[in-house]
Image: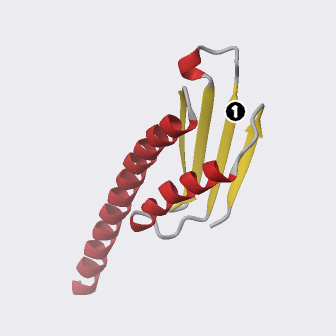
Amino acid sequence: MPIKYFTKNINLSGDFKNVFENKIKKFYHLAPDIKEINVDLSYSPFHAKNESIRLEVSLEVFNKNIVAATRAANFLEAIDIIEEKIKKQLEKAKESRQAKRKITRRLIRETKSL
């Protein structure tokens, strides 16, 4: 899984990358076929102090793009918020995918019985 980092007005340290990659590893049980991850991180001193960090993460999985974005005061807070947003979206996509499979299987069974 290649992770691409895009930054603006900030330097990425190895600590941020390690923390982020550990959070992303949790999603493999929901989506084992993650194709690509894009991380857009920026710092703006002109925003309010509790919104100075902007983090946007997009995943390419299940032939869909899952995108989550947030503003926070620091990296760790932003990563935690993004983790919850992505988790909800991945669970919803997985349930939708499973429902479509059930419908397809039922239709196949019905056509075989004809």
Asked where in the image residue 75 lies, by quadrant, the reply is top right
Q: Which of the image's four quarters has the C terminus?
A: bottom left
Q: Nearer the viewer, residue 83 or 108?
A: 83
* Rendering colour mode: secondary structure
> Relative to 103, is 48 on the left or the right?
right
Q: Nearer the viewer, residue 64 or 108?
A: 64
Asked where in the image residue 69 lies, by quadrant, the reply is top right
Q: Nearer the viewer, residue 10 or 68?
A: 10
Where residue 39 appears, x then y in whole percent? 65, 47
Badge 1 element: strand
Asked where in the image residue 7 lies, by quadrant, the reply is top right
- Circle 1 is placed at which residue position? 42
Where residue 80 appears, x then y in whole percent? 45, 41
Where residue 89 appears, x then y in whole percent? 42, 48
The residue type indicated by label 1 comes to: Ser
Determine whether 52 is above or below 12 in the image.
above
Q: Which of the image's four quarters has the N terminus?
A: bottom right
What residue do we see at 75% from left, 35% from top?
10
Determine whether 62 is above or below 10 in the image.
below
What residue do we see at 60% from left, 36% from top?
55
- Crowding near the residue tagged with mark 1, few <14, some 14–19, many ≥20 C-alpha atoms within 10 Å: some
Determine whether 63 is above or below 66 in the image.
below
Q: Nearer the viewer, residue 36 or 18?
A: 18
> Relative to 34, is 41 on the left or the right?
right
Where residue 107 appears, x then y in whole percent? 29, 73
What residue do we see at 33% from left, 65% from top?
98
